[in-house]
Image (tube, helix red, strand yellow):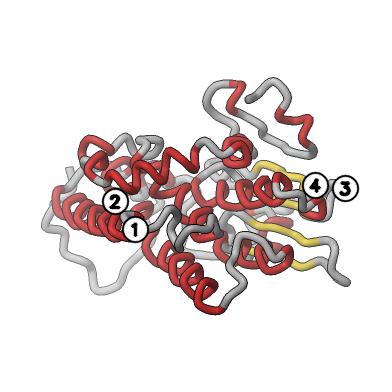
Amino acid sequence: MPDPTYTPPAIWSFDAENGGKFANINRPTAGARFDKALPRGEHPFQLHSMATPNGVKATVMLEELLAAGYEGAQYDAYPVNIGDGDQFGSGFVDINPNSKIPALIDTTTSTDTRVFESGSILLYLAEKFGAFIPKDPAGRTECMNWLFWQMGSAPFLGGGFGHFYAYAPEKYQYPIDRYAMEVKRQLDVLDKQLANNKFIAGDEYTIADISIWPWYGALVRNVVYNASEFLQTHEYTNVVRWANEIAERPAVKRGLMVNRTWGEPQEQVPERHSEADFEGKI
């Protein structure tokens, strides 16, 4: 086992074998690693993603828009297997130079518009359709507060707690304790907010909920990291109530299936091109 009192060298160097579960894809460089064009469907939006928490934000948003009657939100969704390194293909890097899912193309603009980063995708779609974002300045600002809260907070949950608790090749107390403490603090922030609000930003379901639910809703429902007992997530009763209510939304159920390539067959819609792709799944 490596020395837990590791002393950093004067100059860091890349060790390809020291990355845990994702050692085969993690590198300290950006850019395409191979040539691969992206498929293109017939619908206005082209989504390239995977059903991780960040990917689920985009598919839930698109399914919610369609459920609300916005037919202009029809989309084709293609899977990007990040474990295999699909995100480093030249076509994907062209639409997201950061090589992270999800990435979206809007073909309805004069030239194709690329949209990357999950929070940016949610805001782009909310503004384009005038949906799931309050129209009054105060309500919009509150919604944006929580959208940006999630973008800043979730890395402590995923790359911090999730990595060291679930994925790191060795388990060390300090990083697990440090990130567990922060995640419980974040859950307490949400619990206090939801004590007096039906949804995250008030009485209205918004992109704030769509952004936060795939991470923190999954955590309290024990869908990610198998850490509910360790973190005692049942204590956050308002978060649990909110998470379970959103999980029952039909559009959320569909969004969870899109670009999913694991689990039971009825849970998977690896590619999505129409509502017919969900037949027999729900």
Q: Label 2 near label 4: C-beta < 8 Å?
A: no
In whole angstroms, how far apart are the C-alphas of marks 3 and 2?
Answer: 40 Å
> Image check: 118 left or right of 115?
left
Q: Position of residue 55 (x, y in %)?
A: 57, 49
Neighbourhood count class around disc 4 (C-alpha, 10 Å): few under 14, some 14–19, many 20 upward: few
Q: Is residue 253 above or below residue 212?
A: above
Residue at label 2? 161
> Image check: 174 left or right of 66?
left
Q: Disc 3 or 2, which lies upstream in sequence?
A: 3
> Image check: 220 left or right of 129?
left
In whole angstroms, how far apart are the C-alphas of marks 4 and 1?
Answer: 45 Å
Q: Position of residue 133 (x, y in %)?
A: 59, 65
Residue 38 seen in the figure: no
In whole angstroms, how far apart are the C-alphas of marks 1 and 3?
Answer: 44 Å
Q: Label 3 near label 1: C-beta < 8 Å?
A: no
Residue at label 1? 196
Q: Disc 4 or 1, which lies upstream in sequence?
A: 4
Q: Secondary structure at mark 4?
A: loop
The N terminus lies in quadrant: top left
Q: Residue visible at 19% across and 57% down?
A: 178
In whole angstroms, how far apart are the C-alphas of marks 2 and 1?
Answer: 28 Å
Q: Secondary structure at mark 3?
A: loop
As shown in the figure, which amino acid type bears the numbered disc 3? Glu
Neighbourhood count class around disc 1 (C-alpha, 10 Å): few under 14, some 14–19, many 20 upward: few
